[in-house]
Image (cartoon, grey):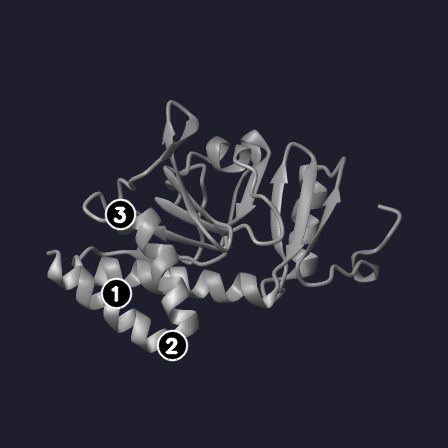
Amino acid sequence: MLLELKQITVPPGNQLLLKDITWQKFETLLTELGESRASRLSYSNGTLEMMVPCMEHEVNKVLISDLVKILLEELDIEFWPLGSTTFKNENIAQAIEADDCFYIQNEAAVRGKNRIDLATDPPPDLAIEIDITSRTQLNNYEALGVPELWRYNGRSLQISVLQDGKYVQSDRTPQFPSFPIAHLIPQYIEQSKTAGRNVAMKAFRALVRSQI
């Protein structure tokens, strides 16, 4: 590369696309960036995207993650949250860092692990992306075989379910089929921002308990 990584600055809420990046260079960049960075990365067949989330992005991510955890706790479903872990597969030249992700059905397969290798381990069962300043591309997730992807744009939640290697949009989530998640998530995010986070989370927990 003509520029060193330390010379590149991506302001919050913006993204940078780098093309003709070999897998070896991608691995080197991951090492140089380290795990304490603020940026999120995705890699697909030589194209690397770097995105630095803004405050609105992070608030929505945390709120949705909290709502998912409430559902899983109240339904007594074991889960393993892996946040923005880097998932990669050199064989198909794909890598992704979700805003958040959860192992649910495959929780036992990764419980307690410090490293995930998609050559032998399953992908996360649910990935969450906040599309405030950019639109998440589906090809990485499809190629890596992530069964379900949620994308929230600040107003609505889109649920994509993997079928025969391609995502199809769904009104319901296989993870929580008894709950109208596409309606509930935006509703309780908005309540968090008006009535307060604790008020909204307690109300959501009470709703879930009333339905089980």
Three-letter amino acid code at disc 3?
A: Pro
Determine whether the residue tagged by mark 2 lies in a helix, strand or loop.
loop
Most extreme residue toward the right, as rendered?
2
Q: Position of residue 97 (x, y in %)?
A: 53, 50
Name the residue nearer the viewer: 119 or 138: 138
The residue that mark 1 highlights is 204
The residue that mark 2 highlights is 196
Assign the C terminus to one quadrant of the image.
Answer: bottom left
Quick check: 123 above or below 162?
below
Quick check: 31 above or below 1?
below
The residue sitting at 24% across, 69% down in the picture is: 203
Earlier in the chain: of badge 2 and badge 3, it is 3
Label 2 to label 1: alpha-carbon separation: 12 Å
Residue 33, located in which quarter of the rendered image? bottom right
Three-letter amino acid code at disc 2?
A: Gly
Three-letter amino acid code at disc 1?
A: Phe
Q: Which label is found at residue 180?
A: 3
Q: Are dots 1 and 3 in contact, CB under 8 Å?
A: no
Earlier in the chain: of badge 1 and badge 3, it is 3
Q: Position of residue 100 (x, y in %)?
A: 45, 55
Q: Callout 1: 10 Å neighbours few (<14), some, many (20+)? A: many
